[in-house]
Image (cartoon, rainbow, N blue to C red):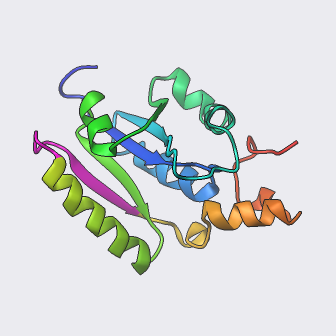
Amino acid sequence: MNNNEKVAVFPGSFDPITLGHYDIIIRALNLFDKIIIAVGKNLEKKNMFSLLKRKKWIRKTFLDFSQKHKIEIDSFNGLTISFCTKKKAKFLLRGIRNQFDFEFEKDILFANKKLDKTDLIETVYLLSSYENSHICSYIVRDIMKNGGDYTIFVPSSVRIE
């Protein structure tokens, strides 16, 4: 990676990855040279799917882009801002669906600004597209648990056996 390369980290639990996540990543590829999809390992959070399964779905979803070195899939625990520093990423990518997301993300931005000792990491927000603004992993998991058609909310790579 050269120093002029615009690298963004897109963190999340991706439990599972949704069409909303996919939309934000695809649109952001026009803004950044590389996007690191960072699957968070939160020991306090009970995930429905294993880290291995979530990374596998993401890898399959973005196979064409990974081969072109536009997308990297990684996992982390701890602070997102520390992961960005470790990866030498100058941007933190976040999606916003509604005003509640905005308020939440704004507080995280201010905390990250205090924690970022380099003062080089900028947070970039993309608004969800209208078609995807209602999709969140929590709702998709609920649909999955209750036998509904979750496939209309996730990339085709996400299938439960």
Residue that appears at 74% across and 44% down: 158
At 63% from the left edge and 60% from the top edge, which residue is drawn? Answer: 137
Vertical placement of 146 versus 81: above or below?
Answer: below
Q: In the rendered structure, which segment of residues is drawn in magenta?
A: 116-126
Percent x, y of residue 132: 59, 67
Image coordinates for residue 109, horizontal then vertical, percent? 25, 60
* 11 relative position to 106: left or right: right
Viewer-nearest residue: 48 or 12 = 48
* Residue 28 place in picture, x, y as percent: 41, 48
State whether residue 7 appears in this view.
Answer: no
> Which quadrant of the view contains residue 107?
bottom left
Query: What residue appears at the point 40 percent right and 80 percent down from the top-left corner?
Result: 99
Q: Find the residue positioned furthest to the bottom.
A: 99
Q: Quadrant of the C terminus?
A: top right
The residue positioned 52% from the left and 67% from the top of the image is 129
Q: How many marks?
A: 0
Residue 90 visible in the current orientation: yes
**Left or right of 60 in this view: 147:** right
Where is residue 12 shown, x and y percent of the image? 48, 49
Above or below residue 16? Residue 100 is below
Is 119 in the magenta?
A: yes
Give 64 or 87, whichever is nearer the viewer: 87
Residue 26 lies within the magenta run: no
**Residue 31 position (above or below residue 60):** below
**Quadrant including the N terminus:** top left
Vertical comparison of 135 with 72: above or below: below
